Amino acid sequence: MATYTGRPNRLSSTPGASSMPRIPRFLINSAATSGTSAKPAHTSPASPALPRRRILGGLALSAIMAPRAKAALLQPLAVEPWTRTPGAPVLDHPYGVPSQHEAGVVRREARAWPVPGAASSLTPLADLHGAITPNGLVYERHHAGVPDIDPDQHRLVVHGLVREPKLFTMDDLLRLPSESRVHFLECSGNTASEWKGPSGLPVQITHGLLSCCEWTGVRLSTLIEAAGGLATNDGHTPRWILAEGADAAAMTRSLPLDRVLDRAFVVYAQNGERLRPENGYPLRLLIPGFEGNTNVKWLRRLKLVDAPLETREETSKYTNLLADGRARQFVFEMDAKSVITRPSPGHQLTMHGYYPIVGLAWSGRGAIRQVDVSTDGGRTWQPAQLDGPAKDRALTSFHAGWVWNGEPAAILSRATDSTGYTQPTREALVEARGLNSYYHYNGIQQWRIGADGSVRNA
Ligand SMILES: Nc1nc2c(c(=O)[nH]1)N[C@H]1C(S)=C(S)[C@@H](COP(=O)(O)O)O[C@H]1N2
Ligand SMILES: [Mo]
């Protein structure tokens, strides 16, 4: 079980932080009171903004420090084994890997799928910091496994209602003007576990079909231009675009041109390096804000058409059944949503006092404008602080201060996006959409804190 030490992720105050309580003095060296090894306080760098006298003064006043930790403060720093001899040589790992102490921070599978090659793995949200998902931890969803594609043989064709149908090699694409933008990617099945009420699952399993990368590639509009521009043939006007993958599922989706043309791009890189095989190497479609499955991986074909093709993913799959038996088709945008990642189920609060509440918010319809946090089950709310300017259709991390008095509590977060839309309660969502739905669950998520400091999805 992870121990949540409650270390603040930012010590300096920032404009707009008025709702945020000042960091209590005893917190400055909280590491000395929790965890297994009590380290001398002066090894942990404190904020330069806080004068040393105040830090030490705060410690002296602290009523919660374990006697062992207090004694350790008076000892000189130990000279640890790693300080006594030179460390590992350069290029120990030509491609770097995380510290061996972070070996538990990995993607996990939530469930077994009934079809060979069909699988998903989830991002460990509770262990990540900031808004970017490292490439090795981006969630995966494959309908028919991960193809091993030779980039030199891969081709992208742009055809249909264009003037000059065109075949692109990867080299061709790399010579076209490129763009790098940060966007989240969320599977429409993310958090489906909570439709019928709290599932008991941790945040990696409830919300981990969610990642955020800086993607680099070529705008769809640039590709269409390179194919001579849109063309009307035999009375057929280009209004939709069909995207097809080169995997064994040949994943195929039709997309309305007027809603994707301004922001869709075909990407060959994520977070500075070429796409990982599991995320679509060598090429994928990225439509910021749209449900995960429209972001066709291993992209090999874009066809301009006049109407949706009604593929399998648009009829049998990825429709949303309402209470009255009718289904919504072509629901593309992921609505505003947020979740508290720390503390979250599996964490353990180890002391009474100050804890930052840390989480993520996002919207498929724009930028996050505000996040509110409640610690009393949704009766009262306080605005959280957004960690940096919120980007369009990107994960935005937030934090809020909380002093836990040791009583049972229920912590929640609620996102509002730049369209003015606010994340609904589960009850409001069920009221509007019924219980036949599977996809697009974005209800407010609550975690319960027990008097023993346990955190549960209950
Ligand atoms: N060709 C192809 N594209 C695909 C898929 C697939 O199985 N095949 N899965 C889709 C689904 S359902 C999702 S949620 C996202 C997942 O992208 P990721 O694996 O990079 O996280 O890719 C989409 N694109
Ligand atoms: Mo998905």
Image (tube, helix red, strand yellow):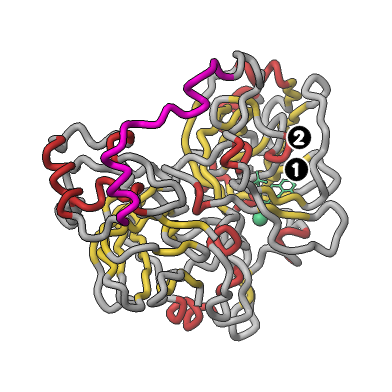
- Marks 2/1: CA distance? 6 Å
Q: Name which residue lies at 46% across and 57% down.
A: 3
Asked if disc 2 is less than 8 Å from ligand 1, the answer is no
Q: Upstream in the sequence, badge 2 or badge 1?
A: 1
Ligand 2 position by quadrant: bottom right
Residue carrying label 2: 300
Q: Name which residue lies at 32% across and 43% down.
A: 72
Query: Residue 292: horizontal and vertical position, in percent?
Result: 61, 51
Residue carrying label 1: 244
Q: Name which residue lies at 73% across and 27% down.
A: 165
Q: For numbered disc 1, what is the local secondary structure? A: strand
Q: Is residue 70 magenta?
A: yes
Asked if disc 1 is less than 8 Å from ligand 1, the answer is yes
Bin the neighbour count of mark 1 within 10 Å (Cα to Cα): few under 14, some 14-19, many 20 and up. many
Q: For numbered disc 2, what is the local secondary structure? A: strand
The amino acid sitting under disc 2 is: Arg
215 sits left or right of 417 in the view: right
What is the quadrant of the N terminus in the image?
bottom right
The amino acid sitting under disc 1 is: Glu
Q: Name which residue lies at 45% across and 64% down.
A: 348
Disc 2 vs disc 1: Cβ atoms closer than 8 Å? yes
15 sits left or right of 309 in the view: left
Query: Up-down: is 425 above or below 184?
Result: below
Query: Residue 418: horizontal and vertical position, in percent?
Result: 32, 53
Magenta residues (range): 66-87
